[in-house]
Amino acid sequence: MSRIVTASAPVAALVVAALALPAAAGAYATGGTTAPTSGQIDALAREAGTLPPVFPVAGKHDFGTGENGFGGGRGHQGQDLLSACGTPVVIAKAGKVTVAKWHAAAGNFAVVETESGTNHVYMHLRSPARVEVGDRVGAGQKIGVVGQTGRATTCHLHFELWTASGWYEGGRPVDPAPLLRRLDADA
């Protein structure tokens, strides 16, 4: 027995876009016989912001101890994710880049505002973020790699979660650990 699957408008648009990829990418549009790859469809979904949230460290990592968590000593406003320098850092949830720069304490960092208005902050990147203010970014898109910039004493990603109106714009920091642990379990 066959089933009929109905796609939502965003998914249907992705399929149509995937079928319009150039022949060099192996799409149907130019008479090729190869269907779009899952990687091509994932790339389009990232651009459209339709992929589900993902864990921001794409490699081996550790949540550390109490001092690495929200409120842990020194007024810590995020969660440190310990990982080897050079481990890829990816966007956790689609949004728009509102800040991408250097700060003495944060090192190389970027802020992404999600559709809900919350902000995700990625700090201590080894090099300047691979995005610019105004860029639309998708879940899973590489933003940089784990580093030890700013006042970091070891290689890690410092991840913050802020309520709307955003990072130092009227929002307030909230503990990102529950979100991060859920995303980590889903990975």
Image (tube, grey):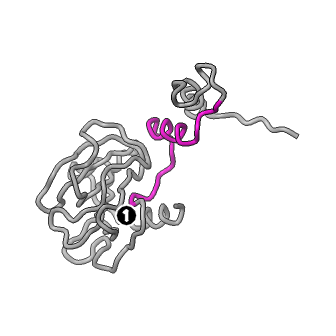
Q: Is residue 46 above or below residue 107?
A: above
Q: Amino acid at mark 1?
A: Pro
Residue closest to the eye, 177 or 83: 83
Q: Judge by depth and name the residue closer to the eye, 43 or 79.
A: 43
Q: Residue at position x 51%, y 49% from top?
A: 52
Q: Position of residue 120 (x, y in %)?
A: 33, 53
The spot of residue 101 in percent (x, y) is: 18, 48
Quadrant where the N terminus sits is top right
Kindly give the residue lying farthest to the left in the view shown: 104
Q: Quadrant of residue 149?
A: bottom left
- Where does the image place residue 60, in percent across and percent down from the top left? 42, 68
Please give left or right for residue 156 compared with residue 25 in the image: left
Please state if 91 lies on the left or on the right of 19 as rendered.
left
User: Where does the image place residue 103, in percent across and percent down from the top left?
Assistant: 13, 56
Q: Is residue 159 left or right of residue 27?
A: left
Label 1: element kind: loop
Return the residue nearer the eye: 103 or 22: 22
124 inside magenta stretch: no
Quarter of the image for residue 30 reads: top right
Q: Which residue is mark 1?
A: 176
Range drawn in magenta: 34-57
46 is within the stretch colored magenta: yes
Q: Residue at x 32, y 68 (%)?
A: 84
Q: Residue furthest right?
A: 1
Disc 1 crowd, CA 10 A, few/some/many (<14, 14-19, 20+): some
